[in-house]
Image (tube, rainbow, N blue to C red):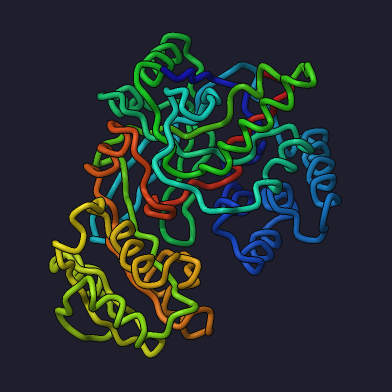
């Protein structure tokens, strides 16, 4: 079972009053314009370390390391005097209009080898350069943003409900309230450690960050570095794998190398057309009610398709898996379709209008039951099957490795 430990966190000294200006969404959802926007909020915004704006190549990592050390020296960042867990609460309204309240905990999760158990992946990863986060970790000797894990421990939410010491609260651009609380009480620390250590943790978001943590751990061990023990763990937010703690969106497929007409032919062989319309706020609800996927064109026109069940007798019942099967059966590979990934129906339509793809296929979110089955059976979903929302902010707690 996984090891999950408290750590002495680096936190913004003035987080209680300035957290919005100091934090940002995670690096992997930021566009260059987003980075500039957050960087101008404050000279101490976390993007200046997590993804430096005005440096390239190795210099950007050197700059990040210098910057974070300057912030520590100048008391912009303060180190917790003792190891702690950080409760992270979010309050928001979900896509269905329901008010939601979630809670998880940030700590240091054990870094395990592939197949070792205890910490499990839930989807395949896409080919992607992993050196950026690795080089940043090497330079800063710090975990800057948490991996997102889902615990299979029944009752973890109840363990986390009681408040801790308030360390900061903010409301983001989407109206999501983010609140972090420090837990230092020895009995409560042991209760959290025991609960999460009792059951496997499934990596929900941050597969690449977890993978580079494994590489970094191995490097530190090979060098007999004093950082090796700390590198055996990585900063992770863990919440219980239950419906009320998760808000799951789909990641849709942009199709760059296939025209809308060609995509219609591919889909017609495996699906049945059930209706044409125009993209609207009701599109996703209609997809759910019809159990359909949706072909979207640059002009905003849509066609819903339901599965021909007999065509997918040996394919897992996931929109992503079955769409991949249809495309690869027709074209020989996903690469031949020029697939890329984008969450949000409006963002997908914007990408089509910008000429980034010829058409798109909207898919439905993966169910909680399917995520649970994936974990229980040791399966992997296709890449980019799930998009967990709201996104955790970077900068609410950081984990320096040299003090563990």
Q: Position of residue 43 (x, y in %)?
A: 75, 54
Where in the figure is residue 264, as x and y percent of width and height? 30, 82
Q: In which quarter of the image is the N terminus?
A: top left
Q: In this view, does 388 lie above or below 262?
A: above
Task: Name the side, left or right, on which 277 lies relative to 379.
Answer: left
Q: Image quadrant of residue 138?
A: top right
Taking the spot 24% from the left edge, 49% from the top edge, the residue there is 367
Outermost residue to the bottom:
299
Viewer can see residue 273: yes
**What percent of the width, then of the height, locates residue 172?**
48, 56
Residue nearer the viewer, 85 or 284: 284
**Which of these two is toward me, 262 or 191?**
262
Which residue is depicted at the point 34% across and 38% down?
379
Whether residue 207 sits left or right of residue 403 in the image: it is left
From the top left corner, tell me how far across and down residue 83 is, in percent: 59, 18
* Total numbered labels placed on residues in the image: 0
Q: Quadrant of residue 260?
A: bottom left
Rendered residue at 22%/86% (across/down): 277
Q: Against 191, is 243 above or below?
A: below
Q: Residue at x 59, y 60 (%)?
A: 30
- Is residue 389 in view? no
**Image quadrant where one finds the C terminus:** top right
Hey, which residue is sitting farthest top in the picture?
Answer: 187
In this rendering, the answer to whether 278 lies above or below 162 is: below
Instruction: Work out whether residue 131 or residue 133 is closer to the camera in this orientation and state it.
Output: 131
């Amino acid at each position: 079972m996984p090891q999950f430990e408290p750590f002495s966190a680096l936190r913004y000294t003035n987080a209680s009053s300035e957290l919005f200006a100091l934090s940002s969404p995670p690096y992997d959802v930021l566009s260059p314009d987003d980075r500039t926007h957050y960087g101008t909020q404050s000279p101490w915004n976390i993007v200046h370390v997590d993804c430096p704006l005005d440096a390239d190549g190795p210099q950007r990592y050197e700059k990040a390391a210098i910057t974070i050390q300057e912030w520590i020296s100048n008391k912009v960042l303060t180190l917790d005097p003792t190891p702690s867990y950080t409760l992270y609460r979010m309050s928001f309204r979900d896509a269905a209009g329901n008010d939601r309240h979630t809670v998880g905990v940030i700590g240091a999760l054990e870094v395990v080898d592939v197949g070792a158990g205890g910490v499990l992946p839930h989807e395949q990863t896409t080919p992607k350069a992993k050196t950026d986060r690795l080089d940043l970790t090497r330079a800063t000797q710090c975990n800057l943003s948490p991996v997102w894990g889902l615990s299979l421990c029944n009752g973890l939410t109840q363990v986390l409900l009681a408040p801790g010491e308030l360390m900061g609260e903010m409301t983001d651009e989407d109206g999501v309230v983010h609140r972090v609380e420090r837990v230092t009480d020895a009995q409560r620390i042991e209760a959290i450690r025991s609960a999460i250590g009792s059951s496997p943790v499934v990596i929900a978001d941050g597969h690449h960050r977890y993978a580079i943590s494994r590489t970094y751990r191995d490097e530190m061990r090979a060098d007999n570095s004093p950082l090796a023990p700390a590198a055996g763990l990585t900063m992770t937010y863990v919440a219980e794998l239950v419906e009320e703690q998760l808000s799951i969106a789909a990641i849709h497929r942009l199709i760059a190398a296939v025209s809308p007409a060609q995509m219609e032919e591919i889909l017609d062989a495996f699906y049945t057309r059930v209706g044409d319309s125009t993209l609207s706020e009701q599109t996703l609800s209609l997809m759910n009610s019809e159990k359909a996927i949706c072909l979207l064109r640059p002009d905003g026109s849509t066609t819903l398709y339901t599965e021909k069940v007999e065509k997918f007798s040996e394919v897992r019942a996931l929109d992503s898996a079955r769409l991949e099967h249809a495309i690869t059966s027709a074209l020989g590979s996903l690469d031949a379709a020029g697939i890329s990934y984008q969450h949000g129906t409006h963002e997908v339509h914007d990408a089509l209008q910008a000429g980034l793809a010829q058409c798109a296929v909207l898919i439905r979110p993966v169910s909680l039951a399917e995520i649970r089955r994936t974990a229980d059976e040791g399966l992997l979903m296709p890449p980019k099957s799930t998009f967990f929302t709201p996104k955790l902010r970077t900068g609410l707690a950081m984990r320096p490795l040299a003090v563990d």
